[in-house]
Amino acid sequence: MIPFLMAMTCRSEPNGFTFRQRLLLLLVFILGMATASATRGCLYQDTNMTKTQTRMNVCINDLHLPFGDQTAVKLSLNFIRDEQPGRIHLLGDVCDLYSISKFDKDPNRRLNLQEELDTVRDWLIELRDAAPRAKIIYSEGNHEFRLKKYLMSEAKALAGLRALSLEKLLDFDKLRIRWQAHDRPYRVGHLLFTHGSLISKWSACSAKRHFERYGCCTIHGHTHRLGAFYHTDITETYGAFENGCLCSLTPDYMTAPDWQHGFSVVWTERSGFFHVEQVAIVRGVYCWHGRVIGKKRDAPHVVEEIR
């Protein structure tokens, strides 16, 4: 194409373009090629986003709405609004679907399924408003899978209706959210993203088990813990990460669970290289690049003092 334009500048047809016009066309073409080349270098193409934003991924999971911790959920949403990441990974159990759980239910909780879904959809609208240009990927967790299990066991004739899928009920198309089924983990570069299915007693032990299952670098939710596991063999170094939670740390079915609030920021490069920064929210406060954000609150009182 360039030799063709250069040839045009040398021709001298009486009714054609002037030399100056041809030279201007050549300059416009070169500038266009340079712009296209720069755009291809971005992982998530958006001319309104900086290169730093396109490399930035935020991972959050296990909100268990409507039983989320209001402070932790608000802090993570404000972080996303301030930082404007290129991708947001919802690693499952955003909703709880308590009303269709097979476990015994507290009669004082008078939630119905529609109210739960409305709460989740309202939060997803907030998330989309906070990051209007981000690519949002929602992985199905075991709590989202409750809907399929309920339909398969209690309403088999309705189980195949597309209108009853979570993607339709939560309006994913309108909110521009990509849905990943529970059996479909996905990769960005060298890092595998999934909700997770394995739980061990201590922080990072579950991450280790997920590394052993998948044989690659992994980030997952499900355990409600923060943790990182590393392994180096003769040629490579691997990392696996547990991504905490944003739900209440004082559930009514367990006393003093070993859970931590938090989320992760994943920096990715086109080469596949990545770096994970885990952000722990402790009593309503977290630290990000030297800044302390939030307001410290008292620890929950789970032990009664008798005198």
Image: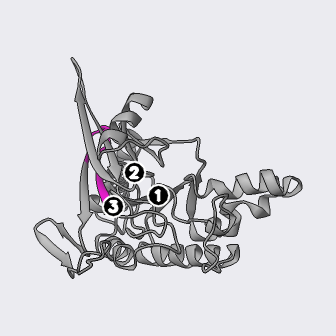
Which residue is the site of mark 1?
16
Side (left or right) of 173 relative to 73: right
Which quadrant does the C terminus fall into?
A: bottom left
Is 269 one of the magenta-colored residues? yes
Secondary element type, mark 3: helix
Residue 288: x %, y % from top left = 18, 67
For the residues labelled 3 and 1, say whether their Cβ atoms are less than 8 Å apart.
no
Give the structural element (helix, strand or loop) at label 1. loop
**Magenta residues (range):** 262-275
Residues under labels 1 and 2: Cα distance?
7 Å
Q: In the structure shown, which secondary structural element does the residue marked by tag 2 occupy?
A: loop
**Quadrant position of residue 201:** top left
Q: CA distance from mark 3 to mark 1?
A: 14 Å
Identify the amino acid type marked 1: Gly
Give the Cα separation between the discs numbered 2 and 3: 16 Å
Q: Nearer the viewer, residue 249 or 157?
A: 249
